[in-house]
Image (cartoon, helix red, strand yellow):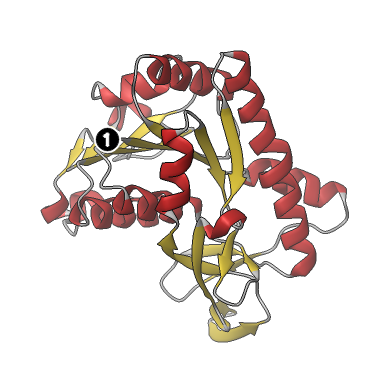
Amino acid sequence: MIVVKVGGSEGINYEAVAKDAAALWKAGQKLILVHGGSSETNKIAEALGHPPQFLTHPGGMTSRLTDRRTLEIFEMVYCGLVNKRIVELLQREGVNAVGLSGLDGRIFEGRRKEAVKYVEGGKIKIHRGDFTGSVERVNTALLTLLLEAGYLPVLTPPAVSYEGDAINTDGDTAASMLATSLKAEALLLLSNVPGLLANFPDESSLIREIPAAKVGDPAYMAVAQGRMKKKVLGAVEAVQGGVGRVIFGDARVEQPIQKALAGAGTVVR
């Protein structure tokens, strides 16, 4: 089993991802696709007059401020536009894909955050009423049912809270939890960069491998920019949780999945 997470930034070659996934699937490789949609969501939110807002948290991470209207736009893009685009591409390749959100069948389930701490003007403030949370449980029984029946699951946030609310959640973290729950052979995190870069955005400075036991070394964490820091920490957690290896790969190229599995990108093991 492999879990493939495809990012939602500019430059992603969804056609190449779908074609590659289909080729592997037809060859007998069991896999689940998880995807994002941040770039498309930002554009549509702007067009609808509800531009995205982001919070910077005390640890330096950022997240999308998700009020009810933002959540509705998020669902429209992630669960509708992007999810069905990928399902359609897979169907064209002869693969019977099923697109679902984490809300469906409680595939991704977790706790909604009652309050979110963020930094503004050098002060720590608290935002309440956000529809965000982290995935804590995965409905592997439903996914196994689909896989055994010959369907390729294509999954996307949002997740669902224990109380039944839709919650915006980090797609990489959800994919990591999924891979850990399935004890996957590999988790691939494909985006619009070739992997972890020692000197971002210089792509020739690609770091080929990160030993999970040494992730705290300055050579790795000091160069992880923005969201990449969260990706690296999540990758280490996945490896420690039983996933064989995690690969940061390039989703802009042809055969992105097979190339990542062959060693292109940054491997965490």
In the foreground, 29 or 250: 29
- Across and down, in percent, residue 179 comes to 33, 47
Query: Which of the 4 image quadrants contains residue 123?
Result: bottom right
- Residue 172 shows in this picture: no
Which quadrant of the figure contains the N terminus? Answer: top left
Whether residue 186 sits left or right of residue 257 in the image: it is: left
- Residue at 30% x, 29% y is 265
The residue that mark 1 highlights is: 266
In the foreground, 181 or 239: 181
The amino acid sitting under disc 1 is Thr
- Across and down, in percent, residue 88 comes to 66, 24
Whether residue 252 sits left or right of residue 101 in the image: it is: left
- Residue 74 shows in this picture: yes
- Across and down, in percent, residue 249 comes to 37, 31
- Residue at 21% x, 50% y is 239
- Residue at 65% x, 67% y is 65
Q: At numbered mark 1, what does the secondary structure look like: helix, strand or loop?
A: strand
